[in-house]
Image: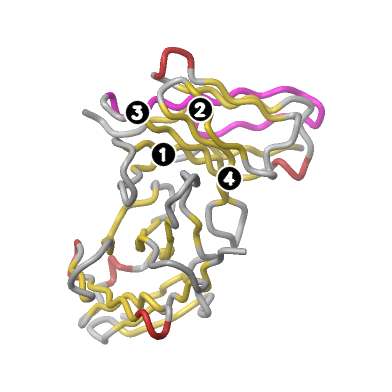
Amino acid sequence: DTGVSQDPRHKITKRGQNVTFRCDPISEHNRLYWYRQTLGQGPEFLTYFQNEAQLEKSRLLSDRFSAERPKGSFSTLEIQRTEQGDSAMYLCASSFGTSPGYEQFFGPGTRLTVL
Amino acid sequence: AQSVTQPDIHITVSEGASLELRCNYSYGATPYLFWYVQSPGQGLQLLLKYFSGDTLVQGIKGFEAEFKRSQSSFNLRKPSVHWSDAAEYFCAVFYGGSQGNLIFGKGTKLSVKP
């Protein structure tokens, strides 16, 4: 087991372009989360999946954002028509179980820069 | 709205000195409480967590934290700081219910003087 992995680690794009990030959770984990972290802030929740079902979406997740988790394994986060305000670190986390208080394991993040 | 407050943005301590990082959460049912550490280029690593029971919890790397319900606080402590502890520290809470996510504070950046 190598933990949560994210790809790419860095992405530079021009405003208006679409980008897609991938997250591979720890293999037996059934929950997967996406967070966004901007400079000087803590991570902010975007969305989460339990298996393949997307159970909750934050108000931060505008219509330009979409996330999927086909087959309950890896997940992708797509941002369409990127804006400079989308520049941030995008973190993925996974956990096992549905009981409260589970530990979330975080990946290294994808740093997005929108020029 | 549920929130987590870390009042100190940046703290500098001398190596070998003691450390206390403050965390307060908004009032509500006892949440599940966490402290994470983030080093440059690294993901968030869990230091310790509190769910119930003994209000003093021990974590990795010599850290401990104390839950005080009356003060809605969960402060992180370490008796003797090492230069390798320099990083950013985040307090987080999980309130349960239909929410699946952690709510994080804005973090406290720790610098260690030799």
The mark nearer the N terminus, 2 or 4, is 2
The residues tagged by marks 4 and 3 sit, at their Cα atoms, a distance apart of: 20 Å
The mark nearer the N terminus, 4 or 3, is 3
Give the residue at mark 1. Answer: A93
Give, as a single range, the part of the protein colored magenta.
A9-27
Of badges 3 and 2, the one in the foreground is 3
The residues tagged by marks 1 and 2 sit, at their Cα atoms, a distance apart of: 15 Å
Give the residue at mark 4. Answer: A36
The residues tagged by marks 2 and 4 sit, at their Cα atoms, a distance apart of: 15 Å
Q: Where A58 falls versus B79 (above or below)? A: above
| Element class at badge 3 | loop
Picture quarter containing residue B74?
A: bottom left
Picture quarter containing residue A40?
A: bottom right
Where residue B33 appears, x then y in whole percent?
Answer: 36, 63
Q: Do callouts 4 and 3 mark residues in contact (Cβ within 8 Å)?
A: no
The residues tagged by marks 3 and 2 sit, at their Cα atoms, a distance apart of: 22 Å
Of badges 3 and 1, the one in the foreground is 3
Disc 2 packing (10 Å; few <14; some 14–19; many ≥20)? some
The three-letter amino acid code for the residue at tag 1 is Ala
The three-letter amino acid code for the residue at tag 4 is Arg
Tell me the tag on residue A8: 2
Give the residue at mark 3. Answer: A30
